[in-house]
Amino acid sequence: MNTQVFERSPQNSQLDQHGEFEHQINEATFDLKTYLSERRAQVEVALDQSITVVYPEKIYEAMRYSLLAGGKRLRPILCLASCELTGGTVEMAMPTACALEMIHTMSLIHDDLPAMDNDDYRRGRLTNHKVYGEDIAILAGDGLLAYAFEFIVEKTKQVQAEHLLQVVAKLGHAVAATGLVGGQVLDLQSEGQDNIDVETLNFIHTHKTGALLEASVVCGALLAGANNEVLHRFSRYACNIGLAFQIIDDVLDVTATSEELGKTAGKDQKAHKVTYPSVWGIEKSRHQAKELVEEAKAELAPFGEKSIPLMAIADFITTRTH
């Protein structure tokens, strides 16, 4: 990942809690590499402390194996960034950030199973079921999903109960048949079919990938008590970057190596999946992802320079190499 510096105009404004524009001036430069590195380090420490190994040891070891396997930690970082932008703190958002990574890790463990996408490697190491067996892998995912909600409720401090309930409801919606699960079902049903159109492809990925990314951004703002106008802007921002993220994922599956990805490259083609490059080609797919990112960034314009971290993350999505 290269260091990227984003420059913004000194004329800035931020939406306050009443939807009015409040003048705000911050530093005019932003180092994305440093920001992601620092936030990722904070998340890693919190995740390591979130689960300890107790009896029966095997299930906790399996949960920790996948949860602590590294990765970009994009979802928790988005949650922290949106909470800070709307007046909250890293401390109040960290339990939700960790819960988002637990849920995301569950989805990866289950996605890699032979009955799903059937992959042997994830984040550069053997997948959970290859180490612990399919039975424990399924239960490790179940354990992470259930614990994520307990963790939010037990560990979150200085957040109003109403806001916490909104976060729990938002996450439940994002992971259920209304979100991740529904997208995964349609993805499995679409394998091997040649008549999948872009609308169906968009539905799959706005649910399978986008729903949790959208929840990551919106939940951070919910914790800080953001108003509906802000929440709607964040939702539109997140939906656009979520779809852009998946388009680039599809492109990288074709153009990157397994070593670069940390997982098996070319598996979409082997599984006869319809992808954005298979519909549009690589260059048009990249162009579409870039347009989505520009639309996402436009939603953040009223926040001025406080939105720079979220703006930079949006740009990172289309320039990443893994």
Image (spheres, helix red, strand yellow):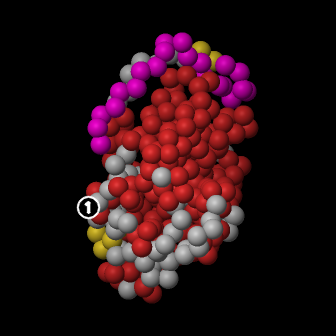
Whole-percent x, y for residue 288 in the image? 54, 43
For the residue pair 136 and 159, the one nearer the viewer reads as 136
Report which quarter residue 58 is drawn in: bottom left
Whole-percent x, y for residue 143 in the image? 50, 74
Residue furthest toward the top? 11
Query: Is residue 5 in the magenta section?
Result: yes
From the viewer's perspective, is residue 123 above or below residue 56?
above
Query: Is residue 186 in the magenta section?
Result: no
Whole-percent x, y for residue 6 in the image? 40, 26
Q: Residues within 10 Å of mark 1 (few under 14, many from 20)?
A: few
Whole-percent x, y for residue 296 in the image? 58, 37
Task: Please give left or right for residue 68 compared with residue 291 in the image.
Answer: left
For the residue pair 209 and 292, the one nearer the viewer reads as 292
Q: Amino acid at mark 1?
A: Glu
Q: Is residue 315 visible?
A: yes
Say which residue appears at 32% left-offset and 56% top-offset. 256
Which quarter of the rendering shows the N terminus? top left
Query: Of helix, strand and loop, which one carries label 1?
Result: helix
| Magenta span: chief secondary structure | loop
Say which residue appears at 51% left-offset and 69% top-offset. 273
Q: Is residue 247 visible?
A: no
Tell me the magenta residue range: 1-21
Say which residue appears at 44% left-offset and 82% top-offset. 114
Task: Please give left or right for residue 262 compared with residue 191 in the image.
Answer: left
Task: Please give left or right for residue 162 compared with residue 193 in the image.
Answer: right
Report which quarter residue 225 is drawn in: top right
Say which residue appears at 65% left-offset and 41% top-offset. 236
From the viewer's perspective, is residue 153 above or below residue 160?
below
Residue furthest toward the left? 259
> Which residue is denoted by mark 1 in the rendering?
259
Task: Please give left or right for residue 27 compared with residue 298 in the image.
Answer: left
Report which quarter residue 35 is drawn in: top left
